[in-house]
Amino acid sequence: MSALSPCTTPGEALAARASERGDQIAIILPGSGQQMTYAEWHQRANALARALVDAGVEPGVHIGLLAENRIEWPVVQMAVALAGAVLVPLNTHFRPNDLAFALEKSEVEHLFLSEAFRNSNYLDMVRQVRDRLPLLDTIIGLDGQAEDTVSYANMLEAGRKSAAALPDVDPDAVASLQFTSGTTGDPKGALLTHAGMMANAWGISGRLRVTPADRWITFIPLFHCAGCIMCILGTVQRGCTFLSMPSFDPLQMFSVMQDQKCTILSGVPTSYLAMLDHPGRSGFDLSSLRAGTCGGADTDPELLRRCAEGFPVPGLVQVYGQTESSTLISLADCEAPYRWETCGPPLPGATVRITDARTGAVLPVGETGQIETAGPMVMRGYFKNPEGTAETIGQDGWMRTGDLGNLTPDGYIVMAGGRLRDMVIRGGENIYPVEIENLMREHAAIADIAVFGVPDDYYGEAVAAAVQLAAPATADDLRAWCRERIAGYKVPDRIFSVAAFPLTASGKIRKTQLQQQASNGGLAPLD
């Protein structure tokens, strides 16, 4: 593993950057105006880690973090790593029942939290469910001290005066319990190692050609693996500056990217589409942007090309990954000619094969099947979930991603079908929603689209599409347009109109929610 990244733990990388470029700004929070140099980050993280050790935290203890993108987030992340504990990032969209489930299942013993964010009072939520959490010992408030909390500021101050010795951290030890998105079924906690996450972030940042001169911006929540692994651990290894936005707003993004002369942008298809089509974009100078990432099984190569040329973001690449793989499995080099049509080759240390989802047989080059991956960046398993682990990781060590794709002769991954669970089987024909989505986005009236299967008495499943219109169009218009371009059995049988799509925290469309709404009459048919 050591050959895959120069630093195998976050603490090692942070110490190196603080020594080499301590005065450089490492983290900027444009929303609050806060920022932190590498030296400050190193000092605060070490002080907080010593305070955790003084509080009795031992290696392997699970520590939760429930907070919006704020300056304390990367400090807590690094402190937990330095203490040899396991970080449990928690979704800021959680409601009381979601939060209780995650805290209980992950066996969190100490919890850092913001008192409130937007319309969620996290401290009140924890108080509501605390009787369900017998293992939860200490709540550390990032916004001060309440009656039943410990103050983050006080812990930091105490840690600065502490002489506690920090443990030697094993690079192969579990470092993070990262919950999956839970778009189908309950979220599961993927166990990721220090070395696996560091190797992943090093490989990603290498293909983006990140240098200390870069300024990397995203709105992706830090609790998401793309935030705390790809961006934070990529930043600390390459010594660049990371800008974390509190939420996605196109005009705010344009303004910050212009004023801060950002060079790298990470987002998701929905955010890129919103920025590309925003009428105010032409009023900003975005010429500093040189590279970016856009990922997901639903990424449209044509959208990437338009963004690369229109912003412009010339080095925009399509990426592919999963939480269970320590973030990404593959991405193209930001100057490669195939960076929009494919997700590039697997990261160094990762291997990929395509298999028949029913038989497990390895398929030849060019045939679409389930993507499987193996290597040291694959999770150790789901926390206390042997059944889920066995379903995902075979006895041969290969992880079944549930995503559909194929390999080019050069070994590059092509996302050819979306999610295995999203595949529509209509009258025995396999239909890949992403093919229809990419096609229909070319229609001038369609701003965005999601294709999914719905039950049908005759065919078993019928093809449904939820469309967000940019101009007037009827369902018959759209179907006629499709029939001229694709086989009849792929043309959507049912088309619904939506004003907005239900999204996950990472900006992906929740197709399961659309399916439920279609089944119970919650979607309006497009006339």
Image: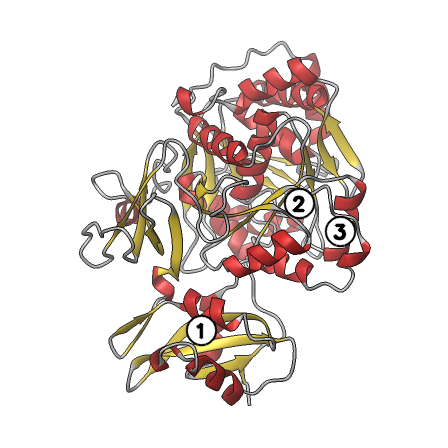
Instruction: Answer left or right for 377 relative to 65.
Output: left
Q: Nearer the viewer, mark 1 or mark 2?
A: 1
Q: Give the residue displayed 25% in from the left and 57% down from the top.
A: 357
Residue 486: image quadrant is: bottom left
Q: Give the residue displayed 59% in from the left and 26% down from the top.
A: 238
Q: In the figure, 377 relative to 405: above or below?
A: above
Badge 3 or badge 1: first in the primary sequence: 3
Q: Residue 320 at x, y = what percent?
A: 45, 48
Q: Residue 323 at x, y = what percent?
A: 44, 44
Front-most of residues 118 and 484: 484
Q: Which residue is mark 2?
A: 68
Instruction: Answer left or right for 430 relative to 257.
Output: left
Q: What type is the residue that disc 3 sits on?
A: Phe
Q: Which residue is mark 3?
A: 254
Q: Residue 149 at x, y = what percent?
A: 67, 36
Tell me, yes or no, whether the two marked residues, 2 and 3, touch with CB atoms within 8 Å: no
- Secondary structure beneath disc 3? helix
Badge 2 or badge 3: first in the primary sequence: 2
> In the rendered image, is residue 273 in sight?
yes
- Dot 3: few (<14), some (14–19), or many (≥20) neighbours within 10 Å? some
- Secondary structure beneath disc 1? helix
Q: Nearer the viewer, mark 3 or mark 1?
A: 3
Residue 402: image quadrant is: bottom left
Q: Residue 239 at x, y = what percent?
A: 63, 25
Q: In the figure, 64 relative to 309: above or below?
A: above
Q: Which residue is mark 1?
A: 515
Tell me, yes or no, whether the two marked residues, 1 and 2, touch with CB atoms within 8 Å: no
